[in-house]
């Protein structure tokens, strides 16, 4: 949206996301991302940590449930969203301001981990979205483990499965030419 500050932050979760539900039944997950800049000091020939930024973040609805079931304390994430400033007054009457990141997208950083992506079924027709394992080793609670992809969805099949889809021959070779000729014509088709 125009006029909103969109930022991307890379950091680690300081705790497990806290999943709550509003009175209307909407899911919301709140968590903190700690981002510490590192610079290389040539004089001492070592890396130095800068001042850490602790940024509160929130996600809503089905997205919140995906985040809460996928990410854990210490997960390194990349998050993008809109920075919101909130002003409030304490019990003592002091005026305070806080910053919060309303997350639009979040995912695991694959720099030091791997993730198993599993497409999540949606309660809304045609809604995209997926979830991720948050860098957990396979078989240890990655989201959607063991769920089957909807019929006819090639993205949900393991490699080598569905060899007859997409015009592939029974050998499963995606580069095999139609008709079994085995050679390609160098002439352009137009």
Image (cartoon, rainbow, N blue to C red):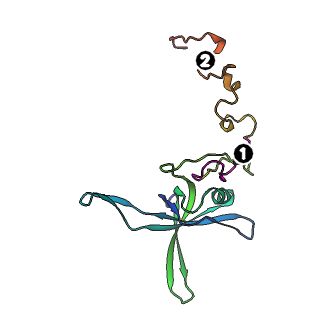
Does 139 lie within the magenta span? Answer: yes
Residue depicted at 23% across the width and 60% down the height: 43
Q: Answer yes or no: do the residues labelled 2 and 1 have beta carbons within 8 Å?
A: no
Residue occupied by mark 1:
146
Q: Where is residue 89 in the image (x, y as percent from the top left)?
A: 55, 83
Q: How far apart are the alpha carbons under marks 2 and 1?
A: 31 Å
- Image: magenta residue range: 134-148
Q: In this view, does 9 lie to the left or right of 129?
A: left
- Closest to the observer, 20 or 72: 72
The image shows residue 183, relative to residue 1, as above or below, that is above
- Which corner quadrant holds the N terminus? bottom right
Residue occupied by mark 2:
176
Residue lying at the far bottom of the rendered structure: 92
User: On residue 158, which mark appears?
Assistant: none
In what element is the residue under mark 2?
loop
The image shows residue 33, relative to residue 112, as above or below, that is below
Q: Position of residue 190 (x, y in %)?
A: 54, 14
In what element is the residue under mark 1?
loop
Q: Where is residue 24 in the image (x, y as percent from the top left)?
A: 75, 68
Residue 59, picture quadrant:
bottom right
Q: Is the magenta stretch mostly helix, strand or loop?
A: loop
Earlier-in-chain disc, 2 versus 1: 1
Residue depicted at 64% across the width and 50% down the height: 131
The image shows residue 16, relative to residue 149, as above or below, that is below
Residue depicted at 58% across the width and 48% down the height: 115
Q: Is residue 180 left or right of residue 36?
A: right
The image shows residue 44, relative to residue 162, as above or below, that is below
- Closest to the observer, 94 or 57: 57
């Amino acid at each position: 949206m125009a006029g909103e500050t969109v930022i991307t932050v890379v950091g680690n979760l300081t705790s497990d996301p806290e999943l709550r539900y509003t009175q209307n039944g909407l899911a919301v997950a709140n968590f903190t991302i700690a981002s510490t800049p590192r610079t290389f000091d040539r004089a001492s020939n070592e890396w130095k940590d800068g001042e850490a930024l602790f940024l509160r973040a929130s996600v809503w609805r089905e997205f919140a449930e995906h985040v809460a079931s996928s990410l854990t304390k210490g997960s390194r994430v990349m998050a993008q969203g809109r920075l919101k400033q909130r002003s409030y007054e304490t019990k003592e009457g002091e005026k305070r301001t806080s910053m919060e990141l309303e997350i639009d997208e979040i995912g695991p950083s694959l720099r030091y981990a791997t993730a198993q992506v599993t497409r999540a079924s949606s309660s809304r027709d045609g809604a995209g979205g997926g979830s991720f394992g948050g860098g957990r080793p396979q078989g240890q609670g990655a989201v959607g483990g063991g769920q089957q992809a909807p019929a006819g969805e090639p993205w949900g099949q393991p490699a080598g499965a569905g060899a007859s889809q997409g015009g592939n021959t029974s050998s499963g070779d995606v580069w095999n030419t139609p008709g079994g000729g085995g050679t390609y014509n160098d002439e352009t088709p137009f």
